[in-house]
Every structure is written in structure tokens, then in C-alpha cells.
Image (tube, helix red, strand yellow):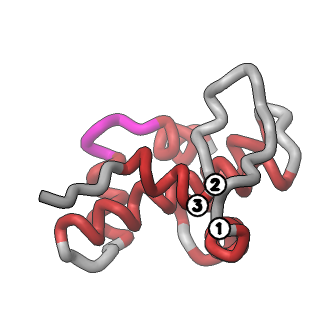
Amino acid sequence: MFTIKPESVFTITGIRSGQKSWVHWRWQCSKFVRQSFIEWASKSVGQSYWAGIYYAQQKAKGNSHQSAVRALAYKWVRILFRCWKTGKAYDESKYLKALKEKGSPLLVVEKAC
């Protein structure tokens, strides 16, 4: 049977977690898909509550704009993959509820403000 793993999607899109100390630009991927996810992530900063907070956290860590957007794109790829596998549409309120239940640091920042 044909199965797709999240790692395969990251390879196809050229977007990785950024958790490695050695970084290089991924050449063997769809440039159009990679750029689409990066642009989507960039636009989501002003449209999605948690995405804006996540971007601000990445910038506070000292990451450049491009690095912060790539990290956000990685999150969006994971969310999109989950939506695709479950066949359910993305719902920001459900995602925020899940973040709250898991004690995500994204929502801890909100309380500190």
C-alpha cells in the first residue's frame, strides 16, 4: 500500500525544521512548492493569531526574517499534512484549543503580555 510520511513532504517542499546545526540550501526539491509555502507562511503572520506569535518568538531568538518564515512554513506543512491525512479542514480555533491543552509556549507569551 502507498503511504506518505511527513518527512517525505518536507523533502518534497524543501522545508525542514531547522533543528540541525549544519545547514545547507536544499536544491533537490520543487522550488515553486517551497516558495509557495514560504510566501503562505509570510502572509499568515498577519492573518493567523498563533503564526504571528510564533514569528515574533523566532525573531526574538535572533533569527532573520527568512529564517523565521521558513520555521513557520515548516509548521504549516505539518498542519496541512495532518489536514490532508484526516480529510478535515483547518480550524484555527481547534488548533488554538489544542495548543492550550498541550501548554504550548505560544500561548504562554500571550499571558505574559
Image coordinates of residue 67 in percent, x first then y, are: 78, 47
Q: Nearer the viewer, mark 3 or mark 1?
A: 1
Q: Position of residue 24 (x, y in %)?
A: 80, 37
Q: Which residues are magenta?
A: 100-104
The reply to whether residue 42 is visible in this rendering is no
Left or right placement of residue 81 versus residue 3 in this view: right
Asked if the residue under mark 1 is in contact with the one under mark 3, i.e. CB atoms within 8 Å, the reply is yes
Q: In percent of the image, x 73 and y 48: which residue is there?
A: 26
Q: In this picture, is 32 found above or below 27?
A: below
- Looking at marks 2 and 1 on the same chain, the residue that comes earlier in the sequence is marked by 2
Q: Are marks 2 and 1 in contact (CB under 8 Å)?
A: yes
Q: Is residue 99 visible?
A: yes
Give the quadrant of the N terminus: bottom left
Where on the picture, by quarter, is residue 86? bottom left
Residue denoted by label 1: 30
Per the image, the residue denoted by label 2 is 14
Q: Secondary structure at mark 2?
A: loop
Residue occupied by mark 3:
13
